[in-house]
Amino acid sequence: MFIAINLSEDTRDRLLTLRDELRSYSRQGNFSLPENLHLTLAFLGECDARQTTAIKAVMDVISFESFEMMIERIGRFKREGGDVWWAGIRDNKILFNLQQNLTAGLRARDFILDKRKYSPHITLGREVISEASPRQIEPFGETVSNVELMKSERIGGKLTYTAIYKKGAKTYNE
């Protein structure tokens, strides 16, 4: 399981153009499926029913306003056997606070989370061997007004992400 920001169709289409461009410069890679493009806020791993209830409780108490999320660069994490290529998110205080509040709440409920500094990105491909270069792109993005708890499973050999719980941004009449 993981908590994520799922993307609009327009943002997904623009990311697919970037993914396909990367693929055209690559000798190999496992490229993200359109329906699996998302921004992870917290990776949780395998969770039982009790843990799932705890995650939902943490999501219920966080509060955030809708915000603009902008994608502005293409980068990679170097890996043996092929790199992880991604679309990077512009620094954003609301996004950072949202992620920090989620992880603090999860840690308070004994979830063990990655301790690395949060680096918001949308994975375009894994195990990629490419002639492409990291670069700035013309920024694009969308308004974020929800975060979702996602279940990850293989269905018919295909990695499938399913939203099982949603938390919306606060509205002005709250």
Image (spheres, rainbow, N blue to C red):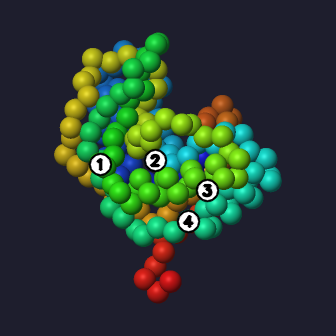
> Could you tell me how far apart the alpha carbons at marks 4 and 2 are, in whole angstroms?
18 Å
Placement of 141 over or under 37, stated as above or below: below
Mark number displayed over residue 3: none
Residue position marked by numbered label 4 in the rendering: 62
Contact (Cβ within 8 Å) of mark 3 with mark 4: yes
Crowding around mark 4 (Cα neighbors within 10 Å: few <14, some 14 to 19, many 20+) is some
Please give the label number shown on residue 39. Answer: 2
Q: Earlier in the sequence, mark 3 or mark 1?
A: 1
Across the whole image, how many numbered discs are drawn on residues? Answer: 4
Measuring from the top left, give residue 124's x and y in whole percent: 41, 35
Q: CA distance from mark 1 to mark 4?
A: 22 Å
Q: CA distance from mark 1 to mark 2?
A: 13 Å
Give how far apart the Cα atoms at labels 3 and 4 are. 8 Å
Q: What's the CA distance linking mark 2 and mark 3?
A: 19 Å
Residue at figure coordinates x 33%, y 18% from the top left: 130
Marks 4/2 in contact by CB < 8 Å: the verdict is no
On screen, 162 above or below 32? below
Give above or below for 83 relative to 37: above
Q: Are marks 3 and 1 in contact (CB under 8 Å)?
A: no
Indicate which disc, 2 or 3, sits on the residue closer to the N terminus: 2
Q: Which residue is mark 1?
A: 90
* Badge 2 density bin: few <14, some 14–19, many ≥20, Cα 10 Å: some
| Residue, disc 3 | 105
Indicate the secondary structure of the residue bearing disc 1. loop
Cα–Cα span, label 3 and label 1: 24 Å
